[in-house]
Image: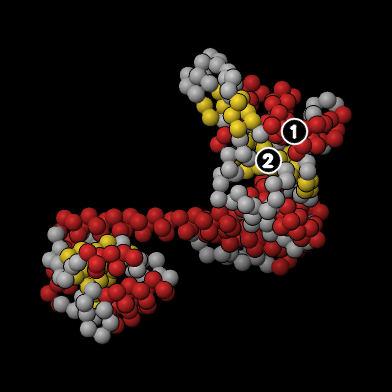
Amino acid sequence: MAKILIIDDEKSIRKTLREILEYENYTIDEAGDGAEGLAMLEKNDYDLVLCDIQMPKVDGIEVLEKTMESGKDVQFIMVSAHGTIENAVEATKRGAFDFIQKPPDLNRLLLTIRNALDKSTLVSETKTLKKKISKTYDIIGESQKIKDIKKTIDKVAPTEARVLITGPNGSGKELVARWLHAQSKRANGPLVEVNCAAIPTELIESELFGHEKGSFTSAIKQRIGKFEQATGGTLFLDEIGDMSLSAQAKVLRALQENKITRVGGEKEIKVDVRIVAATNKDIQKEIEENRFREDLFHRLSVIPIYVPPLRDRLEDIPLLVDKFLVEIAEDYGDTCKPIEPEAVKYLQTLKWTGNIRELKNVIERLIIMSGKVITAEDAKTYTIINK
């Protein structure tokens, strides 16, 4: 249950609030003045603080300010017998969730506490999610090939140039696309991903450009396509080598004119998207065999980026292993399991036909199957299918 700190110089108020909140199953601590409250906030973590404004030594506003400056993730509800609009505005401007006048109305107090705790949970979850996403989509490696990719991204990302990312499955093409978007001027816009290989040929045009109601049998309502959804941001066309020739022709027109037409529609719709595409296929061979349009290839590949297979950058494996050990431990809510240097060296001798994706799966398997330390013997035993 949530942990709440009550800071008030009136003992009777603290006692009353404690009885009410403990009845609601909250865990309660008390502080008799602002200085004591700050000391407790420094030592302990709280989900919520109920803080009086007028107190000796250190007043409530100062407690609020110093706590906000420290970066503590805690919600404040300010309480005062001398409530004015000015006090309420001042408290909220400085970071308080709400302001309640003494004596507090019980129903309003409990509702405000619940709302503040909901916000605290949401803020915490958002920070965790952002941290997890930033870690998940980081490009790890110090090999020359990875350094070259990072340098290219740094130069290309701020521009509007289209990028074609090539490389084998599992090598990290999606990470490159996400980095390009994150470092671009469109970073605050949407990043919309389309896996062209996962969408049936007859539906790809509807997926990309949308459709009007009644344009085909199952079109029971209007649909907004990925081009429109990505307006102001980046459209990532993954596995574009699997796109049908008819869809390629429409994509080419959209790139040339910055306009699209929904399936079954006649109206031209302006779109403002940056295209990043990726494929694991040899596009030149696809062009020679008339499976990919050469003019579309030239439109897409203003900047080509090749992501090498893991076997071509084995020196990056120790860094990747460390990253996956930490990430998987966090996902499991466990401490990071150590791995012997000899085990890492063994992993560097394998072929890694599944690339980064396969390495992560193997590390997860080793975490589950090994003892307190991942040994070289564990690595040899549980990666036998990788030989």
Image quadrant in which you'd find residue 72? bottom left
Q: CA distance from mark 1 to mark 2?
A: 15 Å
Relative to 283, does residue 92 appear above or below in the rendering?
below
Relative to 138, does residue 244 appear above or below in the rendering?
above
x, y percent for residue 267: 58, 23
Relative to 150, does residue 252 appear above or below in the rendering?
above
Question: Which amino acid type is shown beneath numbered disc 2?
Answer: Ile
Query: Which residue is drawn at the image coordinates 42% and 59% (left, top)?
Result: 124
Q: Residue furthest bottom?
A: 57
Residue 357 in view: no
Q: Which residue is mark 1?
A: 241
* Dot 1 crowding, Cα within 10 Å, few <14, some 14–19, many 20+: many
**SS state under label 1:** helix
x, y percent for residue 353: 76, 46
Query: Which residue is drawn at the image coordinates 14% and 59% (left, top)?
Result: 105
x, y percent for residue 107: 16, 55
- Of 254 and 381, the residue lying toward us: 254
Q: Residue furthest right?
A: 288
- Of 317 and 166, the residue lying toward us: 166
Residue 304 in view: yes
Display colour scheme = secondary structure
Question: Which amino acid type is shown beneath numbered disc 1?
Answer: Gly
Relative to 46, does residue 215 appear above or below in the rendering?
above
Q: Which residue is mark 2?
A: 275
Query: Which residue is drawn at the image coordinates 28% and 82% (left, top)?
Result: 58
- Left or right: where 107 falls relative to 216: left
Q: Residue 301: which numbered mark, if any?
A: none
First in sequence, mark 1 or 2: give its number: 1
- Left or right: where 190 falls relative to 168: left
Query: Which residue is drawn at the image coordinates 61% and 67% (left, top)?
Result: 338
